[in-house]
Image: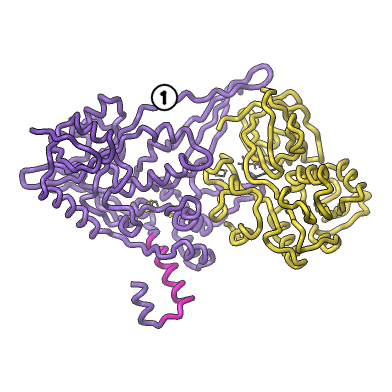
Amino acid sequence: MLPNPFHIQRLQKETYDTFTVELTPTNSTNTFLFSAGQFNMLYVFGVGEVPISISGDPARTETIKHTARAVGTVTRALQKLKSGDMLGVRGPFGSHWPVEESVGNDVVIIAGGIGLSPLRPVLYQLIAQRKKYKKIALLYGVRTPEDLLYKRELEQWRGRFDIEVKITVDTATGDWCGDVGVVTTLIRRVQFDPLHAMAMICGPEVMMRFTIKELQNCGVGNERIFISMERNMKCGIGLCGHCQCGPTFICKDGPVFRYDRIKEFFGKREI
Amino acid sequence: MITPSIKVMDRVILERNHFQKLIDVLITRDYRVVGPTLGEGAIVYDELNSVDKLPIGWTDDQDGGTYRLKKRSDQALFGYVVGPHSWKKFLLPSALRLWQAKRHDNGFQIIPENEEIQKFAFIGVRSCDIHAVSTQDKIFMNGQHIDPHYQSRRKDAFILAVNCGKADGTCFCVSMNTGPKVTFGFDLAVTEILEDNNHYFVVEVGTELGAEILHEVTYREANGREKKLADGIIKNTARQMGRVMDTTNIKDLLYKNYEHPRWDDVAKRCLTCANCTMVCPTCFCTTVEDVTDLTGDHAERWRKLDSCFTMDFSYIHGGSIRASTKSRYRQWMTHKLAAWIDQFGMSGCVGCGRCITWCPVAIDITEEVRAIRENEMIDTSTISGKEKTNAIA
Ligand SMILES: Cc1cc2nc3c(=O)[nH]c(=O)nc-3n(C[C@H](O)[C@H](O)[C@H](O)COP(=O)(O)OP(=O)(O)OC[C@H]3O[C@@H](n4cnc5c(N)ncnc54)[C@H](O)[C@@H]3O)c2cc1C
Ligand code: SF4
Ligand code: SF4
Ligand code: FES
């Protein structure tokens, strides 16, 4: 229950309101192991503690990365920290994406906005073991081109012949000449075998709702669709009650859910 | 007086005038003895070093939205039911500092709380509340993560339970299968008996520790008549339940009725004051507050009891998940009576009636369930009119 001390090695701006913090444990003997999709509770001294997904490579245990958007008290304070500053970390908590279970399948990753950050660890793992998977597609939607995360890496992935990367923006600005429209429109534009594909979705709840519908229309079964959910969280370990959604505690039963296991409660208003 | 040796499950007699001795023994054994006492115009749980601090000769009169203290015609020590407090007052304190942190040159240091918890002796725990404590045990001590703060308060607690000698207007432990007879989770369980000139307790021994402690107090063997009297009192209490709740398939009933019009109806009455969650002995939700002193060099984290009735409870960037009163009442009741069963394998309601008594507008959980069930039956049932009325009654 006590936060562990970590030092900020680097704090890098991603977009005008998002940034990635790279942390190293202060007691450097401890390596930090996590699975793709898990999150940490990050504590900024005297300000507060918030759940943030881990966005780095699970194979690299010397540092942990988090990508956050500055939206309120704690995340803004986090954004102002510098390398060398200290953070409290509790975690890793929660369930993970079905990276192992997807072996031998097509994998379709669908992200909206900051939702790409908890999915980036999946991409690292898929790429490291590329041969084990069939088709890999990343479909990414953001509001404007200025909101794109990880631009350099997106370019790298796009440059590979073995991953299909499609990006769309809600509103084109500047010299954007790519796709315009919501992310769901990209689904029909990639070829995958719906009976042997695994879909992993993270983004705002409405985006996930429409994405699920479109995947279902394409013939993907609910047991092949995975989503990551968000709720207010105070403890991260199933004790404070804040993150409930129906019978589940998002912090320990989720945040990643196989869709057929949460569908009774997901997307219903005010549950 | 002969003192026969006693073992778990034995029933013996403790005389009323030896009750102080029991408290003394517990104090000598270093317990912090707490139990019912008069305060705040109600019977509340507080320090109890003397038998005279018990609400002797008092009783309570409870109904939806009302609680009144009354004099009894006798000098019973436990002649009332449960008040606004529950044992979570001690096991899950409403505010608790979890740790402190001190800033230093290259960061800060977390200083764990060094809690010295004196072991509790709870006097007068009712059957519904034993079930409530065991519910919280399951949450805080039996899951993947253990709450050390709860555990340190709970693990050595001594429980002196009381079989209720009366039920009140808002009690429904019989419906919830949680009372009135105390069946587990106690060290000693007493049934209070007042006859013309005799005032004594039939004591059931629940644990070795209970036997040991009773041994240090004076007791005598119970005869068949006394044991029968005790059984009769409990049976009689079971017949006095002021409320009833039909729990048949209650989980599915509520899961299936998220959109029932009754939620809109209760939302018009509910003030989202959170009283119900505060008095409920099983409600366990907490929040944390991180604070600093004026210099900014010293920080603390506090854990405080929270309620799903507040807007902040479900706040995420962009707004609260449960913004409407309807959704918050629905969350509370559906959690208690349905989701809890999935989460912990038991109901989150033990039928103590506190939420009914202490709701300023007398919202009644049993009534809300009934309203949903009745309508649902009209909606979905194919049974004939006559059978239907029978089924509802
Ligand atoms: C499992 C999980 C993973 C997350 N991963 C990321 C991530 O990788 N990157 C990222 O930028 N954000 C992520 N979030 C959202 C992030 O936790 C919130 O943006 C953050 O809590 C906002 O806190 P604040 O103090 O800056 O904002 P304020 O609006 O000032 O928040 C006040 C309080 O409300 C609560 N709160 C507000 N918004 C949220 C929210 N969206 N989710 C949960 N609690 C909230 C927090 O308790 C916070 O302390 C994640 C949320 C969850 C539940
Ligand atoms: S049900 Fe009653 S006690 Fe509970 S929040 Fe509503 S008004 Fe308050
Ligand atoms: S919901 Fe009401 S009756 Fe049930 S345990 Fe809580 S306070 Fe008691
Ligand atoms: S965050 Fe506390 S129970 Fe899930």
Residue appearing at x 84%, y 48% in the figure: A131
Q: Is residue A251 above or below residue B50?
A: below
Residue B233 pos. (x, y %): 18, 53
The reply to whether residue A108 is in sight is: no
Q: Nearer the viewer, residue A192 or A45?
A: A192
Q: Main secondary structure of the magenta part?
A: helix
Residue B185 pos. (x, y %): 33, 43
Residue B195 belongs to magenta span: no
The reply to whether residue A57 is in sight is: yes
Question: In what quadrant of the picture does the C terminus of chain B appear?
Answer: bottom left
Residue assigned mark 1: B116
Residue A102 pos. (x, y %): 74, 52
Quadrant location of ligand 4?
A: top right
Name the residue furthest top. Answer: B105
| Chain B display color | purple
Q: Which residues lie in the magenta part?
A: B366-383
Three-letter code, disc 1: Glu
| Callout 1: SS | loop
Residue appearing at x 67%, y 26% in the figure: A30
Residue appearing at x 77%, y 66% in the figure: A218
Mark 1 belongs to chain: B
Q: Is residue B155 left or right of residue B235?
A: right
| Chain A display color | yellow
Q: Is residue B75 above or below residue B181?
A: above
Q: Nearer the viewer, residue A117 or B202?
A: B202
Q: How many marks?
A: 1
Q: Would you identify the image quadrant in which residue A269 lies?
A: bottom right
Question: In what quadrant of the picture does the N terminus of chain B appear?
Answer: top left
Residue appearing at x 70%, y 23% in the figure: A28
